[in-house]
């Protein structure tokens, strides 16, 4: 069986603030760079034979440290690119959550199309197809694939036969690893989902001290 390591890109400054989508110029921040570096000691002894990445900068930048450590090229896989969010690309999450359509994204994603963009089903089909193609090129090998949160959740749901309306129940943290086995005979296994390197419970946000009233 071919084993695929589905690795989400590291942290960047748009997460939780904007729907970055396929925007150009979204790079890893300092924490994201550290996450990418941390993947090296975790995976450099693994018998990885190839590295593929979404064409977007944040995924490519996450792949580079491991690729350099293993002396492998980062091969661009267009099918691993982020969902095409269309007219929503670059909009703030605060504004998007106010839209009536946002409820459909959360509750009925199987029937939702982003204005001017893809449906979740279309994104799932092209990403799963890309991974199957990669597996065919690397029979019985271990391959690292760097991509995006929704892409990982969509293909994981596909390989687990999870209904599309439930795919968002799956996790895909920054720099996390999801393991998928694809066999030539059609067998599929997903032994690990959203495994993170050096996990630590996040610190609570700092409480802001109220400013004193002017006299």
Image (cartoon, rainbow, N blue to C red):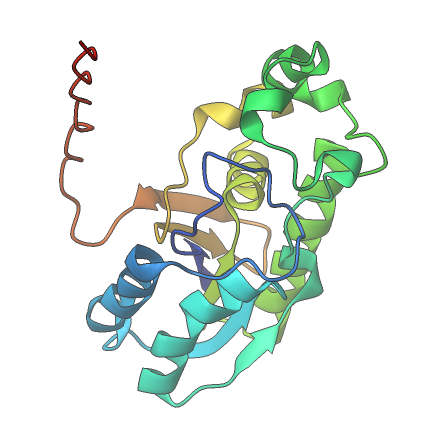
**Image quadrant assignment for residue 102:** top right
Q: Nearer the viewer, residue 185 or 196?
A: 196
Percent coordinates x, y for residue 209 in the rendering: 15, 20
Q: Nearer the viewer, residue 26 or 105?
A: 26
Q: Name the residue rendered at 19%, 16% in the picture.
A: 210
Which residue is the extreme one toward the bottom? 71
Q: Nearer the viewer, residue 94 or 149?
A: 94
Relative to residue 74, is residue 93 depicted above or below? above
Percent coordinates x, y for residue 100 in the rendering: 70, 9
**Image quadrant assignment for residue 154:** top right
Quadrant of the drawing holding the C terminus: top left
Relative to residue 56, is residue 194 depicted above or below? above
Q: Nearer the viewer, residue 75 or 88?
A: 88
Which residue is the extreme one toward the front? 215
Say if residue 118 shows up in the picture. no
Percent coordinates x, y for residue 201 in the rendering: 14, 35
Relative to residue 98, is residue 6 depicted above or below? below
Q: Name the residue rendered at 20%, 10% in the picture.
A: 213
Percent coordinates x, y for residue 164 in the rendering: 63, 25
Tally of numbered discs = 0
Q: Name the residue rendered at 39%, 56% in the picture.
A: 10
Q: Name the residue rendered at 48%, 74% in the picture.
A: 51
Side of 98 relative to 119 (left or right): left
Side of 64 relative to 100 (left or right): left
**Image quadrant assignment for residue 116:** top right
Which residue is the extreme one toward the right? 116
Side of 19 relative to 73 (left or right): right
Say if residue 11 shows up in the picture. yes
């Amino acid at each position: 069986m071919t084993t695929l390591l589905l690795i989400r890109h590291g942290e960047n400054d748009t997460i939780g603030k904007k729907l970055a989508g396929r925007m150009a110029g979204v790079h890893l921040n300092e924490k994201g760079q550290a996450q990418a570096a941390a993947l090296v000691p975790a995976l450099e002894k693994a018998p990885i034979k190839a590295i593929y990445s979404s064409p977007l900068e944040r995924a490519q930048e996450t792949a580079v440290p491991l690729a350099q450590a293993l002396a492998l090229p980062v091969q661009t896989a267009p099918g691993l690119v982020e969902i095409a969010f269309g007219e929503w690309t670059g909009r703030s999450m605060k504004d998007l959550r106010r839209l009536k359509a946002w409820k459909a994204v959360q509750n009925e994603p199987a029937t939702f199309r982003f204005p001017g963009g893809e449906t979740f089903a279309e994104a799932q089909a092209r990403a799963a197809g890309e991974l199957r193609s990669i597996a065919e090129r690397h029979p019985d090998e271990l391959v690292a694939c760097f991509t995006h949160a929704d892409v990982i959740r969509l293909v994981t749901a596909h390989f687990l036969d999870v209904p599309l309306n439930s795919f968002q129940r799956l996790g895909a943290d920054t720099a996390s690893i999801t393991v998928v086995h694809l066999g030539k005979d059609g067998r599929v296994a997903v032994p690990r989902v959203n495994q993170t390197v050096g996990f630590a419970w996040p610190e609570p946000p700092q409480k802001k001290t109220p400013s004193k009233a002017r006299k």
